[in-house]
Image (spheres, rainbow, N blue to C red):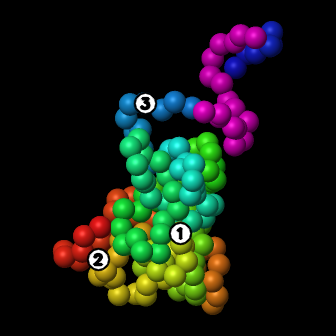
């Protein structure tokens, strides 16, 4: 394009390699695939609970009316909405990954390809539940890496609540 006057121009415009586009609004049909890359997720924001709040890389659920985000409890078996990837705490908005890839804090070792469920021992943590589909808790996603110890590992999140069997109430 001809941008010689620095303000206006005509013709096609070619942007630099990997330009940054801040806060775009996308509407209408996409017309193709949306590639989130290898470590990105679809995220939504919701107000943090002011008492319990949320923690980075931990599972979050909703409480109250209006709903607010807080860290999952060890007694939870369902209703997890995703993994907190930003804005954690007791004020402001939590950024919660609901689909795609996000890092979750695990309570133990992981094996790539295993199912992920809610930890019954550490609040908000994920647990590798093995290669056989769990039947007693919400399935969060699939582990993407092997790790011989507890730690923060990437998970391919399932977008909707999935339970292990037809008799599980989430």
Circle 2 is placed at which residue position?
Answer: 164
Observer-nearest of 147 and 50 = 50
Cα distance between the residues tagged 1 and 3 = 34 Å
The part of the image, by quadrant, that contains residue 38 is bottom right
The part of the image, by quadrant, that contains residue 78 is bottom left
In the image, residue 16 lies in the stretch drawn in magenta:
yes
Q: Nearer the viewer, mark 1 or mark 2?
A: 1
Dot 3 alpha-carbon crowd within 10 angstroms: few under 14, some 14 to 19, many 20 or more: few
The part of the image, by quadrant, that contains residue 61 is bottom left
Q: Residue 124's mark?
A: 1
Residue furthest toward the bottom? 148
| Placement of the N terminus among the 4 image quadrants | top right
Q: Position of residue 135 (x, y in %)?
A: 29, 81
Secondary structure at numbered mark 3: loop
Q: Are marks 2 and 3 in contact (CB under 8 Å)?
A: no
Q: Position of residue 58 (x, y in %)?
A: 57, 65
Residue furthest toward the left? 166
Dot 1 alpha-carbon crowd within 10 angstroms: few under 14, some 14 to 19, many 20 or more: many
Using the image, determine if residue 160 lies above or below residue 168. above
| Placement of the C terminus among the 4 image quadrants | bottom left
Secondary structure at numbered mark 2: loop
Magenta residues (range): 7-23
């Amino acid at each position: 394009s001809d941008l010689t006057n620095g303000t206006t121009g005509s013709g096609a415009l070619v942007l630099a390699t990997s330009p940054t586009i801040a806060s775009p609004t996308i509407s209408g049909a996409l017309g193709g695939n949306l590639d989130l890359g290898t470590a990105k997720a679809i995220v939504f924001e919701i107000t943090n609970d002011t008492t319990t709040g949320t923690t980075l890389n931990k599972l979050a659920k909703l409480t109250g009316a209006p709903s607010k985000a807080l860290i999952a409890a060890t007694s939870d078996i369902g209703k997890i909405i995703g993994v907190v990837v930003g804005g954690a705490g007791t004020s402001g908005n939590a950024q919660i990954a609901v689909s795609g890839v996000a890092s979750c804090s695990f309570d133990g070792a992981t094996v790539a390809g295993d199912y992920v469920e809610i930890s019954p021992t550490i609040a908000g943590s994920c647990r590798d539940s093995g290669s056989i589909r769990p039947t007693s808790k919400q399935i969060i996603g699939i582990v993407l890496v092997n790790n011989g110890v507890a730690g923060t590992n990437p998970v391919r999140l399932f977008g909707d609540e999935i339970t292990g069997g037809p008799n599980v109430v989430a």
